[in-house]
Amino acid sequence: MADRKVLTQIASTAWEHPADRAALNSLRAIPGFDEVVRKIAGFFGEKGVRQLFLANAVLVGPKQRPALNSLYGEVLETLDWPERPDLYVSQTPFVNAAAVGFDKPFIVLNSATISLLEKEERRDILGHELGHIMSGHTTYTTIAIIILTVGLRNLPFLAGMALLPFQLALLEWYRKAELSADRAGLLATQDLDVSLRTFLKMAGGAAGDDEISLEAFMEQAETYETQGDLADRVFQVINTAFKTHPFGTVRAAELQRWVRSGKYDAILNGEYPRRGDPGQPLSEDYVDAAGYYGNQAREAFTQVGDVLARARDAFNNAFKTSDS
C-alpha cells in the first residue's frame, strides 16, 4: 500500500486502549510498586538490559539488513517519530519481538519472526513495537519480561515483598498495552487484512505447502468470544493470568472492534490528538476503562443467564418426561 498517510505529530493517546492507561495508573498505585521497579531497574541498569536481550543479535542499519532498515524508516515516517530507536535482529527460534529498555529503549525482532512474516506483516510488527516506545511502555514491559525470564526467586533483593499481586497486576496491564500497540501496528500498515493476517500467522504459523484462511480465523475469533458458558470464561481468565500477550484471536477481534468504532478512520482523516495537546483526564480514562470491562462483565452475566435458562429448561423437560 504505497499511499499510506503520514500521521503528523500524532500523540500515542490516539491509539492507546483505555484499559491500558487505567491499568497502568492502577498498577502505579499499588503499595511498593515504585520500589520494585526501582530495585529491578537499578540492579540490571541499561547495560544489563542490553546484555540480557542482545547476547545474540545484530544491529540493523544501511549495510545490515538494508531492506528491513528501509522498512523501519518508513514506519518511523508514517508515525512521524523523529527519534530512531536501535533495531536489532536476534538469532532466536521463537516467534516474538519486543521493545525494551529504560533510558534508551530499543527494538528486538527474533529471526523466527522475520522468517514467518512477509514484508507488510513485518511493517505491522515494527509499528507495534514503535507504538510501545511512543507510549512509554518499555520500562514496565522490561520489568515484566525480566521477572518472567529470570524468575522472582532469582531476584534476592525482592525477598520479603508480596510480589504475586504486583506480578498479576503487571501482566494484566501488559496484556492491555498489547492491545494499544496492536492499533499502532495497524496505523503503520493502514491495511486491516495485513494486521489481522499477522495475528493469524503468529497464532498458527505460515501456510507452508498448505493454505491458511483469514476468514476462517476471524470466524474462530468470534466463536472464542461469543460462545461457551461461564466455566469457559473462567478458564479463559486462568489461561491468560500469567501471560504477557492476549491470545491471537482476542487481539484480532479487539482490533476489528476498534476499526468498526470509527476511531481508526477518524485518525486517517486527520482527527487525532497531537503531541503537546492536553491529555485526557485520568477520570475519563477510568470511565472508558469501566465501560470496556463493563461490557465484558455484561457479556459474562448474559452467558450466566443463558446457562441458568438452559438448566431450568433441562430441569422442566426432565419432569415433563417423567410425568408422561
Image (cartoon, grey):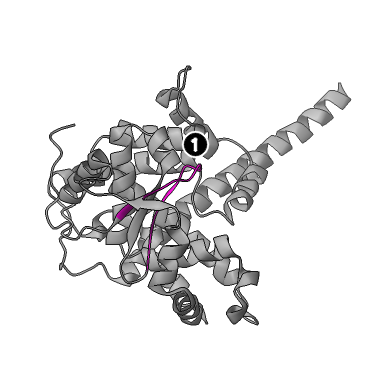
Q: Which residue is drawn at 58% across and 81% down?
A: 157
Residue 54 lies in what quarter of the image?
Answer: bottom left
Q: Residue at x 40, y 64 (%)?
A: 50
Q: Can residue 220 be seen in this view?
A: yes
Circle 1 Cα neighbour tier, 10 Å, few/some/many (<14 / 14–19 / ≥20): some
In the rendered structure, the answer to whether residue 304 lies left or right of residue 217 reads: right
**Quadrant in which the N terminus appears:** top left
Q: Position of residue 140 (x, y in %)?
A: 43, 67
Residue nearest the observer in this picture, 269 or 64: 64
Q: Residue at x 65, y 82 (%)?
A: 160
Label 1 sits on residue: 203
Q: Position of residue 243 (x, y in %)?
A: 55, 53
Residue nearest the observer in this picture, 319 or 140: 140
Element class at badge 1: helix
- In the image, is residue 193 part of the stretch drawn in magenta? no
Residue extending farthest front? 63
Q: Can residue 30 be seen in this view?
A: no
Q: In this view, does 85 lie above or below 90?
A: below
Q: Is residue 27 above or below residue 113?
A: below
Residue 264 lies in what quarter of the image?
Answer: top left
In the rendered structure, the answer to whether residue 264 lies left or right of residue 232 reads: left
Q: Position of residue 139 (x, y in %)?
A: 39, 68
The tally of labels here is 1
Q: Position of residue 130 (x, y in %)?
A: 29, 54
**Quadrant in which the C terminus appears:** top right
Q: Name the residue type under label 1.
A: Ala
User: Magenta segment range?
Assistant: 87-101
